[in-house]
Image (cartoon, rainbow, N blue to C red):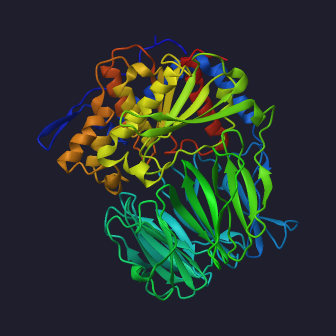
Amino acid sequence: MKKQSLRPPVAPKRPCVMDVHGKRLSDDYHWMRNKDMPEVRAYLNAENAYTRAMMKPSQPLQKKLYREMLARIKETDTEVPYKEGEYYYYSRTRRGQQYRIYCRKRGSLSGREQVILDLNVLGEGRPYIALGALEVSADGKSLAYSLDYSGFRDYTLRVRDLVRGTDRSETVDKTRSVAWAADNRTLFYVTEDEAKRACRVWRRVIGEPGEMLIYEETDARFSVSVSDSRSRRYIFITSHSATTSEVRFVRADFPNAEPKLFQPRRQDHEYYVDHGHDRFYILTNNRGRNFCLAVTSVQDTAESHWRELIPHRDDVMLEGIDVFSRHIVLDERNSGFPRLSVFRIDNGATHVIALPEPASSVYGGANAEFDTTTFRFHYESYVTPDSVYDYDFNSRSMTLLKRREVRGAFSSADYRVEVFHVVAGDGAEVPVSMVYRKSARRRGPQPMLLTGYGAYGYANDVHFSSTRLSLLDRGVIYAVAHVRGGGELGKRWHDEGRMLKKRNSFTDFIACAEHLVDSAYTDPSQLVIEGGSAGGLLVGAVANMRPDLFRAVVADVPFVDVVNTMLDDSLPLTTGEYEEWGNPADDAYFDYLLSYSPYDNVVSAEYPAMLVETSLNDSQVMYWEPAKYVAKLRATKTDHNPLLLRTNMEAGHGGASGRYDFLKEIAFSYAFILGVVGITE
């Protein structure tokens, strides 16, 4: 990478002072929150120009990375079709086109193709497009779909007449989830408020004027969603916070009925409902944090009537259920990795679906049919590309339908996966997973990209990436620290890394990095760390705590301005996240948040090289968080290591929406990573 000789932009300081719990907070860059102010866009554009200039020597490498990543992809490809009603549905891509095309065939796969939605057509001439809802009515005649053209998750709902191939005139802005009633005319959907909280459920009869509000969630901690059961007998309205949930239901064949309350909410009680025949099946944590499975009749939904089918287990997290006519598939997590179990409804027998590799990911695919003997799922690992299987409930056999093709000389046998545990300072055993190319593994330290997340109880699972091969084949080890705050080891693992225990996530990550250095996998001069969103908080915090331990940091849409964001309940997500981070209105939580917030803890010291990436239209981590963070680092740190801010001016939280544009963003980040460890081609 080019040494820092260009002069970076300098953001003016305009202190904004406020007193909180008797403490004086001064924010020199608060002015960057004004998105419409010309000076803000000028600053972001200046940072982009500086970043481009600093990265200009790497352009040949960026182009090379892009070409080789593109060469591994089958650009014209078709997903495995799935059956729903009279149709087989699938999506496909075409070489040179950025987006997916959604299609179906009636009766059999040899039938005539009908394109039901082509995002390339809908996104023509636009820099960004994202698909939200995609729900076909049971009779196959209507499609409810929603699109966002900004990246801010502002989805507009439309209904397409699939017989005529035209959209109806009515549209609904700021929508989220959608569900059809059994009459194929009544549509349930959710809209959001000014803070982007999904809070109102509406009912509309397509083709008739007006809509009816049937439920409004008034507790600002809660969001709401609608869904239909696979049996198509019920519509569920689920209100949920980070710790508590509540369900209402409507019979799909009586859509005008008042929603019935399943079981009143109780703080810290989470439950979720599905339907099969004359029963409701309930995923509930009323017996323990890792959830159990219960059942009740459709007439008696009160908790006192629930009967346990699968007990709570301390060592197995029950994450979800898929209910079919004669079987229930259980999404479980054991020893850090997901697995699938099958529960037979008639006799209660349970078995685990055997998987080829212990360190892998598995999750349900498109399973639209209720009365079936097969279950479709996806399987992958660090060395096995995404693979689609059908599992026969009766014979317990798996049929591989498709494995994502990796073009070129790829062979999974060329790579090695390792999983081990690192003992943190308080004795917690933190899992670490890694993958590297066998022939590139040499004795002694070598370049490593270490990533982490550790929030919301989300597991940072083992996934295949064909783009990652560009790092592995150049001798970079890829590793994941599965720190506390994530969900790898169940709810306990989440609880130990949130609220007033959040610092465990950071100390876990540092312990893992130290172990990797001590074990001669890498050394501080070759260790790059990466995290996105809440993972950006993670790497931002550890960069403040141990800047000497890392060569570089890649922070993608990083949540780094923690205190200011959590003090502003007008922002999207803030109120709903009090149960993850704590409410700074409480002085104990305020002090704790202030103790680790990356923006508030920047000090006059030497920092690693940094690439900070954000998007102007991000609704989850506002662009000004990384922008302010970079401005403060630039004004405070004492080193001359590169500090780059890259803002996508036309996207949201996930970056570019087009698949080719997204590859270019990855190539850019990889060129930075390789450059700081001295790999230039």
Could you say which quadrant of the image residue 85 lies in?
bottom right
Residue at x 15%, y 36% (from the top left corner):
24
Give the left or right position of residue 281, taking residue 80 as reference: left
Count of numbered tags: 0
Q: Nearer the viewer, residue 391 or 652?
A: 391
- Quarter of the rendering occupied by the N terminus: top right
Observer-nearest of 59 and 667: 667
Q: Is residue 67 above or below residue 387?
A: above
Between residues 396 and 71, which one lies in front from this camera angle? 396
Q: Is residue 114 left or right of residue 595?
A: right
Q: Residue at x 83, y 73 (%)?
A: 107
Residue 511: give x, y in percent of width and height: 43, 30
Q: Quadrant of residue 233?
A: bottom right
Res. 42 visible in picture: no
Q: Determine the residue located farthest toward the left in the rendered image.
A: 22
Question: Taking 203 as reference, is 29 left or right?
Answer: left
Picture quadrant where residue 671 is located: top right
Q: Does 261 sit above or below residue 433? A: below
The residue that appears at 31% across and 36% down in the rendered structure is 597
The residue sitting at the right extreme is 110
Q: Residue at x 44, y 43 (%)?
A: 454
Quadrant in the picture for the C terminus: top right
The image position of residue 394, as x and y in percent, is: 76, 70
Residue 327 visible at all = yes
Question: In the image, residue 292 lies at what x, y percent?
Answer: 49, 67
Q: Foreground residue, 581 or 119?
A: 581
Query: Is residue 441 found left or right of 407 in the rendered image?
Result: left
The x, y position of residue 564, in whole percent, is: 28, 42
